[in-house]
């Protein structure tokens, strides 16, 4: 029976919990090397910025071809 101060077993369990709660290690797409699983939370504006970039480059390209 473990009473009083924390034992080594409890300490090891807390370490395991803290390493799991840091964030998911892995990928959004299992076979893809990119993006990491936490990409959506780290860069939430990425789809918006990418869309704007594609529109600007597309307009620039169309203005050159005319």
Image (cartoon, helix red, strand yellow):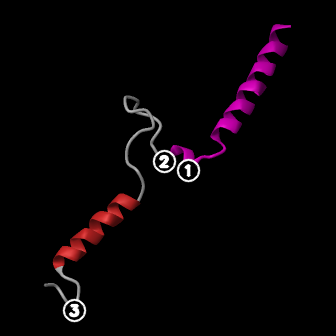
Secondary structure beneath dot 1 equals helix
Q: Residue at x 28, y 64 (%)?
A: 16
The span from disc 2 to disc 1 (Cα, nearest Å) is 6 Å
* Residue 29 position within the rendered picture, expressed as x and y whole percent measured from the top left: 43, 32
* Residue 40 position within the rendered picture, expressed as x and y whole percent measured from the top left: 55, 44
Front tag of 3 and 2:
3
Mark 3: few/some/many CA within 10 Å (<14, 14-19, 20+): few
The span from disc 3 to disc 2 (Cα, nearest Å) is 39 Å
> Is residue 56 inside the magenta stretch?
yes
The span from disc 1 to disc 3 (Cα, nearest Å) is 41 Å
Numbered mark located on residue 63 in the image: none
Secondary structure beneath dot 3 equals loop
Q: Which of the image's four quarters has the N terminus? A: bottom left
* Highlighted magenta segment, given as a residue range: 39-66
Answer with left or right where residue 40 lies relative to residue 13. right
* Residue 47 position within the rendered picture, expressed as x and y whole percent measured from the top left: 65, 36
For marks 3 and 2, the one nearer the N-term is: 3
* Residue 30 position within the rendered picture, expressed as x and y whole percent measured from the top left: 38, 33
Report the front residue among 8 and 55: 8
Q: Is residue 17 above or below residue 34?
A: below
Q: Is residue 50 above or below residue 39?
A: above
Q: Is the Cβ of the residue at disc 2 closer than 8 Å to that at disc 1? A: yes
Q: Is residue 24 above or below residue 7?
A: above
Answer with left or right where residue 15 lies relative to residue 47. left
Mark 1: few/some/many CA within 10 Å (<14, 14-19, 20+): few
For marks 1 and 3, the one nearer the N-term is: 3
Numbered mark located on residue 42 in the image: 1
């Amino acid at each position: 029976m473990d009473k009083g101060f924390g034992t080594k077993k409890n300490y090891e369990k807390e370490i395991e919990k803290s390493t799991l709660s840091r964030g998911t290690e892995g990928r959004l797409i299992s076979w893809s090397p990119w993006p990491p699983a936490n990409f959506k939370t780290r860069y939430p504006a990425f789809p918006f910025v990418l869309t704007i970039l594609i529109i600007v480059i597309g307009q620039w390209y169309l203005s050159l071809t005319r």
